[in-house]
C-alpha cells in the first residue's frame, strides 16, 4: 500500500501506537500469516489487534459476524507497523465442515497459514446434574474438538514450510478445581494433552505446539456476567500480583510464542495468571 493511501492518524491511533511501542516488536512476525479462532471479541480480539500491529497477515474466525466485521473495519487503518488489514470470516467452529471451508477461504485470501491461535471457547456455567449427552457433546465441540481439526487444516501448510507455531488456549480453571462447569474444565484439561501429542507428531517438521493457559482474564463478558465482589476477593487472595489480568497480557505472550524468538519452545504449558495456579 502506498504511503499516499495511508489514512491520516487520529488521536486514538496515536494512543494505540504509544501503547504498542512500550512492548517488544518481533521482526519475524511481519507478513507472517496468522489464523485466530474466536477472534471477534474478548481475548481473541486482542490477539487480532496485536498480531496486526506486528505487521502480520491476520485472518480470524468467529460466529459473531457483526462483531467480527466491525473489528476488521476498525483495524483497517494502516500504519508503519500495521501493514495489512485483518480478514474476517464468519464461521461456527463447532461445524467442522464450515470450519474447514472458512480456513480454506482465509488461505486463499492470505496464503499458507504459519501461525494458528486456537482461541475459541465458551465458559458457560453448568452443574453436573444439568449435563446431558447433547450438552456434553456441545461443550466439547466448542471448547476442545475444533482445536484438533483447525490444527489438522493448517498442518500441511506448516509441514511444507518446515516451520510453524500452534497455540492452544487452555485455562487454569481445572487446576484450581473450579466448580459448576465440569464439561468446560474437562475440555480445558484435555487441551494440554492435545498440545503434547501434537508437539511430538509435528516437531519433526519444525512445527511448535504450546498451550497458552490464562487465569481469570477481565474481558467485557467476564465483567458483565461473572465478576462480583466475591470474585474480586478471590482474585486478590489467589494471585501473587494484585492487578487485573487483561486480554493484552495474553496477546503479548502469544506474540512471543508465534515469533522465531521462541523457536525451541514446544510441548509447554505457558501459564499467564498473575501467579494464581
Image: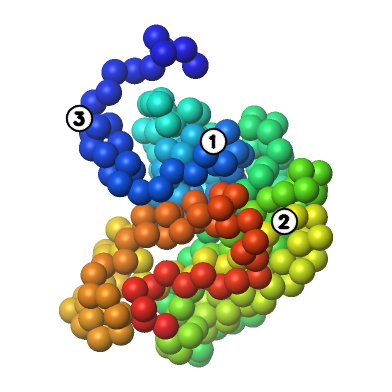
Looking at the rendering, in which quadrant would you find the C terminus? bottom left
Are the residues tagged 2 and 3 within 8 Å (C-beta)? no
Question: Image check: 206 left or right of 39?
Answer: right
Q: Residue at x 67, y 43 (%)?
A: 113
Comparing marks 3 and 1, which lies closer to the viewer? 1
Q: How is the image coloured?
A: rainbow
Q: Residue at x 64, y 37 (%)?
A: 106
Q: Give x and y (percent) for residue 43.
A: 41, 56
Residue pointed to by mark 1 = 30
Given the current orientation, which residue lies at the most extreme top position?
4
Q: CA distance from mark 3 to mark 1?
A: 25 Å
Residue 219 visible, this orientation = yes
Residue closer to the observer: 259 or 189: 259
Question: Image check: 32 left or right of 54?
Answer: right
Determine which quarter of the picture holds residue 58. top right
Secondary structure type for disc 2: strand
- What is the number of the mark on residue 197? none
Around disc 3, counting alpha carbons within 10 Å, would you say few (fewer than 14), some (14 to 19), or many (20 or more)? few
Q: Give x and y (percent) for residue 265.
A: 62, 64
Residue closer to the observer: 116 or 221: 116
Q: CA distance from mark 2 to mark 1?
A: 18 Å
- What is the number of the mark on residue 11? 3
Depicted 207 relative to depicted 227: above or below? above
Residue pointed to by mark 2 = 207
Q: Residue at x 45, y 80 (%)?
A: 173
Comparing marks 2 and 3, which lies closer to the viewer? 2
Secondary structure type for disc 3: helix
Q: Give x and y (percent) for residue 15.
A: 23, 37
Amino acid at each position: 500500500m502506498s504511503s499516499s493511501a495511508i489514512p491520516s492518524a487520529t488521536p486514538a491511533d496515536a494512543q494505540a501506537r504509544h501503547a504498542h511501542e512500550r512492548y517488544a516488536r518481533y521482526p519475524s512476525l511481519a507478513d507472517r500469516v496468522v489464523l485466530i479462532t474466536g477472534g471477534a471479541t474478548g481475548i481473541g480480539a486482542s490477539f487480532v489487534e496485536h498480531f496486526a500491529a506486528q505487521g502480520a497477515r491476520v485472518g480470524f474466525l468467529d460466529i459473531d459476524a457483526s462483531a467480527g466485521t466491525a473489528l476488521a473495519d476498525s483495524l483497517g487503518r494502516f500504519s508503519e507497523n500495521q501493514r495489512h488489514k485483518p480478514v474476517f470470516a464468519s464461521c461456527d467452529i463447532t461445524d467442522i465442515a464450515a470450519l474447514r471451508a472458512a480456513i480454506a477461504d482465509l488461505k486463499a485470501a492470505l496464503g499458507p497459514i504459519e501461525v494458528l491461535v486456537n482461541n475459541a471457547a465458551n465458559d458457560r456455567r453448568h452443574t453436573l446434574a444439568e449435563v446431558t449427552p447433547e450438552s456434553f457433546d456441545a461443550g466439547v465441540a466448542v471448547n476442545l474438538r475444533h482445536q484438533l481439526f483447525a490444527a489438522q487444516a493448517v498442518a500441511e501448510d506448516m509441514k511444507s514450510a518446515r516451520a510453524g507455531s500452534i497455540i492452544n488456549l487452555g485455562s487454569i480453571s481445572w487446576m484450581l478445581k473450579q466448580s459448576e462447569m465440569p464439561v468446560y474444565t474437562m475440555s480445558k484439561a484435555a487441551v494440554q494433552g492435545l498440545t503434547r501429542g501434537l508437539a511430538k507428531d509435528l516437531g519433526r517438521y519444525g512445527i511448535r505446539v504450546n498451550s497458552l493457559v490464562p487465569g481469570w482474564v477481565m474481558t467485557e463478558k467476564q465483567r458483565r456476567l461473572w465478576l462480583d465482589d466475591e470474585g474480586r476477593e478471590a482474585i486478590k487472595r489467589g494471585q501473587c500480583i494484585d492487578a487485573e489480568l487483561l486480554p493484552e497480557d495474553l496477546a503479548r505472550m502469544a506474540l512471543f510464542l508465534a515469533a522465531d524468538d521462541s523457536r525451541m519452545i514446544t510441548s509447554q504449558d505457558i501459564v499467564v495468571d498473575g501467579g494464581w495456579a
